[in-house]
């Protein structure tokens, strides 16, 4: 297994456009997380999937954001009507574990620039 | 609410010096996990250590060591004999131990500190 994979690595879009990012977690990892990281800050939690169920969404995730994880495998994060404030690195992480998760493995992220 | 504070924004050392990165956390949970991650210039977060709140023994892994003190809510990270390759941003993180569902699985999401930029000069 090559780890968590994210696509694309970089995305430049015009304000108002929709964008979609993809995350392929480590196979058999039941937990999947999306985080957002802006310059000089630590990653901030966006949403959490356990298998295909989205169990938590951060207040950072406005109505313009939607995430899915069909069949509990890969996940997509879509941002509609992008705004300049959406410019950030979007990180995906996966982990396994029952009551307690094992360490989370992170992808290399998708850097979004909204112009 | 959970909170992680890394008071040191940037640290600059010369190669072979020892350096300690501070981490202070806040949580109401009695059981939790603490983590350290390294983020090199390539951007990918690299896992370094995971520590259970019930295990206060210090841990050493090569040039890395961690000092967990529950009494002061601190989880500090020391690099001995630093090297240029240690230059990166280091994040301390705290896991969410709330139970997410009837199966007893915790959310496990991480609350990160703001990070400490470590620069090791040759």
Image (cartoon, grey):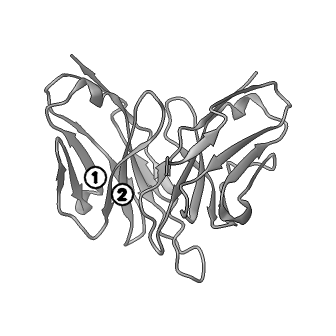
Residue at image location 37% in from the left, 71% down from the top: B31
Secondary-structure class at tag 1: strand
The residue identified by callout 2 is: B34
Marks 2/1 in contact by CB < 8 Å: the verdict is: yes
User: Disc 2 versus disc 1: distance between alpha carbons?
Assistant: 8 Å
Q: Nearer the viewer, residue A15 or B63?
A: B63
In the rendered image, residue A94, in percent from the top left (x then y), is placed at: 53, 56
Q: Nearer the viewer, residue B84 or A2?
A: A2
Drawn side of residue B8 relative to residue B105, left or right: left
Image: A71 above or below A21: below
Q: Nearer the viewer, residue A101 or B35?
A: A101
Chain bearing mark 2 = B
The numbered dot on residue A114 is none
Image: B66 above or below A70: above
The residue identified by callout 1 is: B75
Q: Residue furthest top?
A: B122
């Amino acid at each position: 297994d090559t780890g968590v994979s994210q696509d694309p690595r970089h995305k430049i879009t015009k304000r108002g456009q929709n964008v979609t990012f993809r995350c392929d977690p480590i196979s058999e990892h039941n937990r999947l997380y999306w985080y957002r990281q802006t310059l000089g800050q630590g990653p901030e939690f966006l949403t959490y999937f356990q298998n295909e169920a989205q169990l938590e969404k951060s207040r950072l995730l406005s109505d313009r954001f939607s995430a899915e994880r069909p069949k509990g495998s890969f996940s997509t994060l879509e941002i509609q009507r992008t705004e300049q404030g959406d410019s950030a690195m979007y990180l995906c992480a996966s982990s396994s574990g029952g009551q307690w998760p094992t360490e989370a493995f992170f992808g290399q992220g998708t850097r979004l620039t909204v112009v | 609410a959970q909170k992680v504070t890394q008071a040191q924004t940037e640290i600059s050392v010369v190669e072979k010096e020892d350096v300690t990165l501070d981490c202070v956390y806040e949580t109401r949970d009695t059981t939790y996990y603490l983590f350290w991650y390294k983020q090199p210039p390539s951007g990918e977060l690299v896992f370094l250590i995971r520590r259970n709140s019930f295990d206060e023994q210090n841990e050493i892994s090569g040039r890395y060591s961690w000092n967990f003190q529950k009494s002061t809510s601190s989880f500090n990270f020391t690099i001995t004999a630093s090297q240029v390759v240690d230059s990166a941003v280091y994040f301390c993180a705290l896991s969410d131990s709330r139970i997410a569902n009837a199966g007893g699985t915790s959310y496990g999401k991480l609350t990160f500190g703001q990070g400490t930029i470590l620069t090791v000069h040759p």
